Amino acid sequence: MKDFREASRAALGDELYGYLCGRPHDMNAGDVDPNELAWSRYRLVPRVLQGHAGVDVSCKLFGSEYAAPFGVGAFAADRLFGEAGVGAIARVCASLGLPLFVSEEAVTPLADIAATGVNCWLQLRAAGPIERAVRLVEHAASVGCQGIVLTVLAPVHPVPGLHPGGVDVTAHVAQRGWATIGASEGVAKLPAFPSWSMSELHTLLDAVHALGMRLVVKGVMHPADARACHLAGCDGVMVSNIGVRQSYRWAPVSDVLERMHESEATLLVDGGLRHAADIVAARVLGAQLSIIVRPVVHALAAGGEAAVNELLRGLIGELQAICAWMGAATLADITRDQLTKLN
Protein backbone atom coordinates (compact mmCIF):
# COMPACT_ATOMS: atom_id res chain seq x y z
CA MET A 1 0.00 0.00 0.00
CA LYS A 2 1.46 3.36 -1.04
CA ASP A 3 2.50 5.68 1.76
CA PHE A 4 1.17 9.22 1.24
CA ARG A 5 2.30 10.67 4.57
CA GLU A 6 5.12 12.88 3.32
CA ALA A 7 3.04 14.29 0.48
CA SER A 8 0.21 14.84 2.97
CA ARG A 9 2.48 16.78 5.29
CA ALA A 10 3.63 19.01 2.44
CA ALA A 11 0.03 19.70 1.44
CA LEU A 12 -1.41 20.27 4.92
CA GLY A 13 1.37 22.00 6.84
CA ASP A 14 2.61 20.98 10.25
CA GLU A 15 -0.48 21.97 12.26
CA LEU A 16 -3.13 19.99 10.39
CA TYR A 17 -0.70 17.16 9.73
CA GLY A 18 -0.08 16.99 13.49
CA TYR A 19 -3.81 16.79 14.13
CA LEU A 20 -4.20 14.02 11.56
CA CYS A 21 -1.39 12.00 13.16
CA GLY A 22 -3.25 12.57 16.43
CA ARG A 23 -0.45 12.24 18.98
CA PRO A 24 -2.01 12.58 22.46
CA HIS A 25 -0.64 14.91 25.15
CA ASP A 26 0.97 12.06 27.13
CA MET A 27 2.90 10.61 24.19
CA ASN A 28 6.61 11.48 24.04
CA ALA A 29 8.37 12.49 20.83
CA GLY A 30 10.11 9.14 20.46
CA ASP A 31 7.07 7.00 21.21
CA VAL A 32 5.52 4.85 18.48
CA ASP A 33 1.76 4.59 17.99
CA PRO A 34 0.90 1.62 20.26
CA ASN A 35 -1.80 0.36 17.90
CA GLU A 36 0.55 0.27 14.92
CA LEU A 37 3.29 -1.32 17.02
CA ALA A 38 0.96 -4.04 18.30
CA TRP A 39 -0.26 -4.94 14.80
CA SER A 40 3.33 -5.05 13.51
CA ARG A 41 4.15 -7.82 15.98
CA TYR A 42 1.89 -10.31 14.22
CA ARG A 43 3.47 -12.63 11.69
CA LEU A 44 1.73 -14.77 9.08
CA VAL A 45 2.47 -18.45 8.40
CA PRO A 46 2.05 -19.38 4.70
CA ARG A 47 0.62 -22.68 3.46
CA VAL A 48 1.61 -24.37 0.18
CA LEU A 49 0.21 -26.86 -2.34
CA GLN A 50 -3.40 -26.18 -1.37
CA GLY A 51 -4.68 -26.40 -4.94
CA HIS A 52 -6.83 -23.23 -5.05
CA ALA A 53 -7.53 -21.89 -8.54
CA GLY A 54 -8.44 -18.39 -7.36
CA VAL A 55 -8.85 -16.02 -4.42
CA ASP A 56 -11.97 -14.23 -3.19
CA VAL A 57 -11.47 -11.57 -0.49
CA SER A 58 -15.05 -10.30 -0.47
CA CYS A 59 -17.11 -10.41 2.72
CA LYS A 60 -20.75 -10.30 3.73
CA LEU A 61 -21.84 -8.30 6.75
CA PHE A 62 -25.16 -6.89 7.93
CA GLY A 63 -26.90 -7.98 4.75
CA SER A 64 -24.38 -6.29 2.43
CA GLU A 65 -21.54 -7.72 0.37
CA TYR A 66 -18.26 -5.82 0.28
CA ALA A 67 -15.29 -6.22 -2.03
CA ALA A 68 -12.99 -6.77 0.95
CA PRO A 69 -13.26 -6.97 4.75
CA PHE A 70 -12.44 -3.32 5.35
CA GLY A 71 -14.06 0.08 5.10
CA VAL A 72 -13.06 3.72 5.43
CA GLY A 73 -13.63 5.26 8.85
CA ALA A 74 -15.05 8.57 9.99
CA PHE A 75 -13.06 11.76 10.53
CA ALA A 76 -14.02 15.32 11.41
CA ALA A 77 -13.81 18.52 9.35
CA ASP A 78 -13.22 16.59 6.13
CA ARG A 79 -12.80 19.60 3.85
CA LEU A 80 -9.75 20.73 5.82
CA PHE A 81 -7.95 17.74 4.29
CA GLY A 82 -9.06 18.10 0.69
CA GLU A 83 -11.36 20.42 -1.23
CA ALA A 84 -13.74 17.62 -2.18
CA GLY A 85 -13.70 16.23 1.36
CA VAL A 86 -15.30 12.92 2.10
CA GLY A 87 -17.29 13.15 -1.12
CA ALA A 88 -14.17 12.09 -3.02
CA ILE A 89 -13.72 9.10 -0.73
CA ALA A 90 -17.39 8.19 -1.13
CA ARG A 91 -17.10 8.03 -4.90
CA VAL A 92 -14.11 5.71 -4.68
CA CYS A 93 -15.75 3.46 -2.08
CA ALA A 94 -18.92 3.29 -4.21
CA SER A 95 -16.93 2.25 -7.27
CA LEU A 96 -14.94 -0.39 -5.39
CA GLY A 97 -17.76 -1.79 -3.25
CA LEU A 98 -16.44 -0.72 0.16
CA PRO A 99 -18.42 0.75 3.07
CA LEU A 100 -17.87 4.31 4.30
CA PHE A 101 -18.38 5.61 7.82
CA VAL A 102 -19.07 9.36 8.05
CA SER A 103 -18.62 11.55 11.12
CA GLU A 104 -21.40 13.86 12.25
CA GLU A 105 -18.56 16.41 12.40
CA ALA A 106 -18.01 16.16 8.63
CA VAL A 107 -18.65 19.32 6.61
CA THR A 108 -19.88 17.66 3.40
CA PRO A 109 -23.69 17.22 3.57
CA LEU A 110 -24.76 13.66 4.26
CA ALA A 111 -27.24 13.70 1.38
CA ASP A 112 -24.42 14.51 -1.07
CA ILE A 113 -22.34 11.64 0.29
CA ALA A 114 -25.19 9.14 0.12
CA ALA A 115 -26.04 10.28 -3.43
CA THR A 116 -22.79 8.69 -4.66
CA GLY A 117 -24.37 5.30 -4.04
CA VAL A 118 -21.84 4.34 -1.38
CA ASN A 119 -22.80 1.96 1.44
CA CYS A 120 -22.85 4.74 4.01
CA TRP A 121 -23.03 4.75 7.82
CA LEU A 122 -23.38 7.87 10.00
CA GLN A 123 -21.21 8.05 13.11
CA LEU A 124 -22.82 9.86 16.06
CA ARG A 125 -21.47 10.95 19.44
CA ALA A 126 -23.10 9.47 22.56
CA ALA A 127 -23.54 12.82 24.26
CA GLY A 128 -26.17 15.51 24.64
CA PRO A 129 -29.95 15.08 24.49
CA ILE A 130 -31.14 11.76 23.16
CA GLU A 131 -33.63 13.68 21.01
CA ARG A 132 -30.74 15.23 19.08
CA ALA A 133 -29.29 11.81 18.32
CA VAL A 134 -32.70 10.48 17.23
CA ARG A 135 -33.12 13.43 14.83
CA LEU A 136 -29.77 12.60 13.24
CA VAL A 137 -30.77 8.95 12.96
CA GLU A 138 -33.93 10.01 11.13
CA HIS A 139 -31.89 12.23 8.81
CA ALA A 140 -29.52 9.36 8.06
CA ALA A 141 -32.44 7.09 7.21
CA SER A 142 -34.03 9.73 4.97
CA VAL A 143 -30.95 9.94 2.72
CA GLY A 144 -30.44 6.17 2.53
CA CYS A 145 -27.75 5.38 5.09
CA GLN A 146 -27.30 1.71 5.95
CA GLY A 147 -26.69 2.21 9.66
CA ILE A 148 -25.44 4.18 12.62
CA VAL A 149 -22.14 3.97 14.48
CA LEU A 150 -22.41 5.30 18.02
CA THR A 151 -19.15 6.53 19.55
CA VAL A 152 -19.30 5.83 23.28
CA LEU A 153 -15.61 6.21 24.19
CA ALA A 154 -14.49 9.85 24.52
CA PRO A 155 -17.30 11.28 22.36
CA VAL A 156 -16.23 14.81 23.39
CA HIS A 157 -13.03 16.41 24.74
CA PRO A 158 -13.67 16.83 28.48
CA VAL A 159 -10.70 19.08 29.28
CA PRO A 160 -9.38 22.04 27.22
CA GLY A 161 -5.94 21.57 25.71
CA LEU A 162 -6.14 17.81 25.24
CA HIS A 163 -7.06 17.84 21.57
CA PRO A 164 -5.23 15.33 19.33
CA GLY A 165 -1.96 16.81 18.17
CA GLY A 166 -2.81 19.89 20.23
CA VAL A 167 -5.12 21.16 17.46
CA ASP A 168 -8.78 22.12 17.94
CA VAL A 169 -10.36 21.45 14.55
CA THR A 170 -13.68 22.72 15.94
CA ALA A 171 -12.12 26.18 15.91
CA HIS A 172 -10.98 25.70 12.31
CA VAL A 173 -14.54 24.80 11.29
CA ALA A 174 -15.96 27.81 13.11
CA GLN A 175 -13.40 30.18 11.55
CA ARG A 176 -14.50 29.11 8.08
CA GLY A 177 -18.19 29.48 8.87
CA TRP A 178 -18.90 25.87 8.01
CA ALA A 179 -21.86 23.82 9.14
CA THR A 180 -21.48 20.11 9.88
CA ILE A 181 -23.84 17.16 9.58
CA GLY A 182 -24.53 17.33 13.32
CA ALA A 183 -25.03 21.09 13.66
CA SER A 184 -26.27 24.02 11.59
CA GLU A 185 -23.29 26.08 12.76
CA GLY A 186 -19.87 24.57 13.38
CA VAL A 187 -19.60 21.41 15.48
CA ALA A 188 -22.37 20.56 17.95
CA LYS A 189 -21.54 21.75 21.47
CA LEU A 190 -22.13 18.75 23.73
CA PRO A 191 -21.61 18.23 27.48
CA ALA A 192 -17.98 17.67 28.44
CA PHE A 193 -18.89 14.70 30.63
CA PRO A 194 -21.66 12.76 28.88
CA SER A 195 -24.14 11.03 31.17
CA TRP A 196 -25.36 8.42 28.72
CA SER A 197 -26.12 4.95 30.02
CA MET A 198 -27.70 1.77 28.68
CA SER A 199 -31.07 3.55 28.88
CA GLU A 200 -30.12 6.02 26.15
CA LEU A 201 -28.61 3.20 24.13
CA HIS A 202 -31.89 1.27 24.22
CA THR A 203 -33.82 4.38 23.10
CA LEU A 204 -31.47 5.01 20.19
CA LEU A 205 -31.40 1.34 19.25
CA ASP A 206 -35.19 1.28 19.04
CA ALA A 207 -35.16 4.33 16.78
CA VAL A 208 -32.48 2.86 14.50
CA HIS A 209 -34.18 -0.51 14.16
CA ALA A 210 -37.61 1.06 13.61
CA LEU A 211 -36.14 2.78 10.54
CA GLY A 212 -34.67 -0.45 9.19
CA MET A 213 -31.04 0.39 9.92
CA ARG A 214 -28.30 -1.30 11.96
CA LEU A 215 -26.46 0.02 15.03
CA VAL A 216 -22.78 -0.58 15.83
CA VAL A 217 -21.34 0.70 19.10
CA LYS A 218 -17.82 2.10 18.73
CA GLY A 219 -15.19 2.42 21.45
CA VAL A 220 -15.84 -0.89 23.18
CA MET A 221 -12.65 -2.11 24.87
CA HIS A 222 -13.86 -4.59 27.49
CA PRO A 223 -15.53 -7.98 26.81
CA ALA A 224 -18.19 -7.29 29.45
CA ASP A 225 -19.21 -4.08 27.67
CA ALA A 226 -19.29 -5.88 24.33
CA ARG A 227 -21.47 -8.57 25.85
CA ALA A 228 -23.84 -5.96 27.32
CA CYS A 229 -24.21 -4.25 23.95
CA HIS A 230 -24.82 -7.59 22.26
CA LEU A 231 -27.50 -8.55 24.77
CA ALA A 232 -29.14 -5.14 24.37
CA GLY A 233 -29.68 -5.97 20.70
CA CYS A 234 -26.90 -3.99 19.05
CA ASP A 235 -25.92 -5.35 15.66
CA GLY A 236 -22.20 -5.14 16.34
CA VAL A 237 -19.44 -3.56 18.38
CA MET A 238 -16.36 -1.78 17.09
CA VAL A 239 -13.25 -2.46 19.14
CA SER A 240 -11.58 0.96 19.15
CA ASN A 241 -9.48 3.16 21.41
CA ILE A 242 -10.20 6.09 19.07
CA GLY A 243 -6.73 5.83 17.59
CA VAL A 244 -5.08 6.49 21.00
CA ARG A 245 -5.81 10.14 20.20
CA GLN A 246 -6.81 10.94 23.79
CA SER A 247 -4.31 8.87 25.77
CA TYR A 248 -1.18 6.95 24.84
CA ARG A 249 -1.80 4.56 27.72
CA TRP A 250 -4.95 2.91 26.40
CA ALA A 251 -4.59 -0.76 25.54
CA PRO A 252 -3.83 -1.54 21.87
CA VAL A 253 -6.92 -2.66 19.99
CA SER A 254 -5.32 -5.88 18.72
CA ASP A 255 -4.63 -7.02 22.29
CA VAL A 256 -8.25 -6.34 23.25
CA LEU A 257 -9.63 -7.99 20.11
CA GLU A 258 -8.01 -11.29 21.09
CA ARG A 259 -10.21 -11.36 24.23
CA MET A 260 -13.48 -10.31 22.61
CA HIS A 261 -14.66 -13.69 21.28
CA GLU A 262 -16.36 -14.43 24.62
CA SER A 263 -18.79 -11.54 24.08
CA GLU A 264 -20.50 -13.32 21.14
CA ALA A 265 -20.91 -9.92 19.45
CA THR A 266 -20.26 -9.28 15.77
CA LEU A 267 -16.89 -7.53 15.83
CA LEU A 268 -15.41 -4.66 13.86
CA VAL A 269 -12.02 -3.14 14.67
CA ASP A 270 -10.57 0.35 14.32
CA GLY A 271 -7.15 1.64 15.26
CA GLY A 272 -3.66 1.43 13.80
CA LEU A 273 -4.50 -0.77 10.80
CA ARG A 274 -2.08 0.34 8.10
CA HIS A 275 -1.33 -2.71 5.93
CA ALA A 276 -3.08 -5.64 4.30
CA ALA A 277 -1.33 -7.98 6.75
CA ASP A 278 -3.00 -6.08 9.62
CA ILE A 279 -6.41 -6.71 8.08
CA VAL A 280 -5.62 -10.41 7.69
CA ALA A 281 -4.53 -10.60 11.34
CA ALA A 282 -7.69 -8.81 12.45
CA ARG A 283 -9.84 -11.23 10.45
CA VAL A 284 -8.13 -14.23 12.02
CA LEU A 285 -8.65 -12.69 15.49
CA GLY A 286 -12.39 -12.42 14.87
CA ALA A 287 -13.04 -9.01 13.31
CA GLN A 288 -15.48 -9.20 10.42
CA LEU A 289 -14.54 -5.72 9.21
CA SER A 290 -11.44 -3.54 9.69
CA ILE A 291 -11.64 0.24 9.60
CA ILE A 292 -8.94 2.27 7.82
CA VAL A 293 -8.78 6.02 8.43
CA ARG A 294 -5.47 7.89 8.53
CA PRO A 295 -3.86 6.37 5.41
CA VAL A 296 -6.96 7.33 3.41
CA VAL A 297 -7.01 10.90 4.72
CA HIS A 298 -3.29 11.23 3.94
CA ALA A 299 -4.06 10.11 0.38
CA LEU A 300 -6.94 12.60 0.14
CA ALA A 301 -4.69 15.44 1.25
CA ALA A 302 -1.83 14.38 -0.98
CA GLY A 303 -3.64 13.71 -4.24
CA GLY A 304 -7.41 13.89 -3.90
CA GLU A 305 -9.73 11.29 -5.35
CA ALA A 306 -7.12 9.74 -7.63
CA ALA A 307 -4.76 9.06 -4.74
CA VAL A 308 -7.58 7.59 -2.62
CA ASN A 309 -8.47 5.29 -5.50
CA GLU A 310 -4.83 4.21 -5.88
CA LEU A 311 -4.53 3.50 -2.17
CA LEU A 312 -7.73 1.46 -1.77
CA ARG A 313 -7.30 -0.51 -5.00
CA GLY A 314 -3.76 -1.31 -3.94
CA LEU A 315 -4.94 -2.49 -0.54
CA ILE A 316 -7.47 -4.89 -2.09
CA GLY A 317 -4.74 -6.22 -4.38
CA GLU A 318 -2.38 -6.79 -1.44
CA LEU A 319 -5.10 -8.70 0.39
CA GLN A 320 -5.58 -10.96 -2.61
CA ALA A 321 -1.84 -11.62 -2.79
CA ILE A 322 -1.52 -12.43 0.91
CA CYS A 323 -4.54 -14.71 0.77
CA ALA A 324 -2.92 -16.63 -2.11
CA TRP A 325 0.39 -16.90 -0.26
CA MET A 326 -1.45 -18.17 2.81
CA GLY A 327 -2.84 -21.03 0.71
CA ALA A 328 -6.42 -19.82 1.19
CA ALA A 329 -9.24 -19.40 -1.33
CA THR A 330 -10.91 -16.91 1.05
CA LEU A 331 -9.80 -15.01 4.13
CA ALA A 332 -12.10 -17.20 6.21
CA ASP A 333 -9.91 -20.19 5.25
CA ILE A 334 -6.90 -18.75 7.10
CA THR A 335 -6.65 -20.51 10.45
CA ARG A 336 -5.48 -19.32 13.86
CA ASP A 337 -2.33 -21.44 13.68
CA GLN A 338 -1.27 -19.35 10.69
CA LEU A 339 -0.93 -16.31 12.92
CA THR A 340 1.92 -15.89 15.39
CA LYS A 341 3.05 -12.97 17.52
CA LEU A 342 6.52 -11.71 18.41
CA ASN A 343 7.31 -11.25 22.09
Image: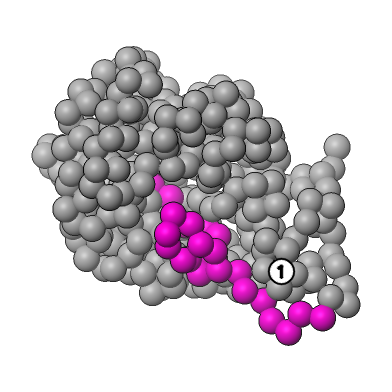
Instruction: Single out the residue that lies furthest toward the bottom.
Output: 53
- Point 54% across, 53% down: residue: 289
- Point 67% across, 76% down: residue: 55
Q: Amino acid at mark 1?
A: Cys
Residue 213: x and y, percent? Answer: 31, 49
The secondary structure that dominates the magenta segment is loop
Given residues 305 and 338, the one toward you in this image is 338
Using residue 174 as the reference point, say whether residue 36 is left or right of it. right
Q: Secondary structure at mark 1?
A: helix
Residue 115 occupies quadrant: bottom left
Residue 307 occupies quadrant: bottom left
Give the magenta range: 51-78
Given residues 36 and 197, the one toward you in this image is 197
- Point 42% across, 35% down: residue: 233
- Quadrant containing the N terminus is bottom right
Residue 148: x and y, percent? Answer: 33, 44
Residue on which disc 1 sits: 323
| Above or below for 110 versus 250 | below
- Quadrant containing the C terminus is top right
Given residues 8 and 120, the one toward you in this image is 120
Given residues 46 and 197, the one toward you in this image is 197
Does the rendering let one see residue 173? Answer: no
In reply to whether residue 280 is colored magenta, the answer given is no
Residue 87: x and y, percent? Answer: 28, 62
Residue 235 occupies quadrant: top left
Query: Is the residue marked by circle 1 packed among few (<14), some (14-19), or many (20+) residues within 10 Å?
Result: many
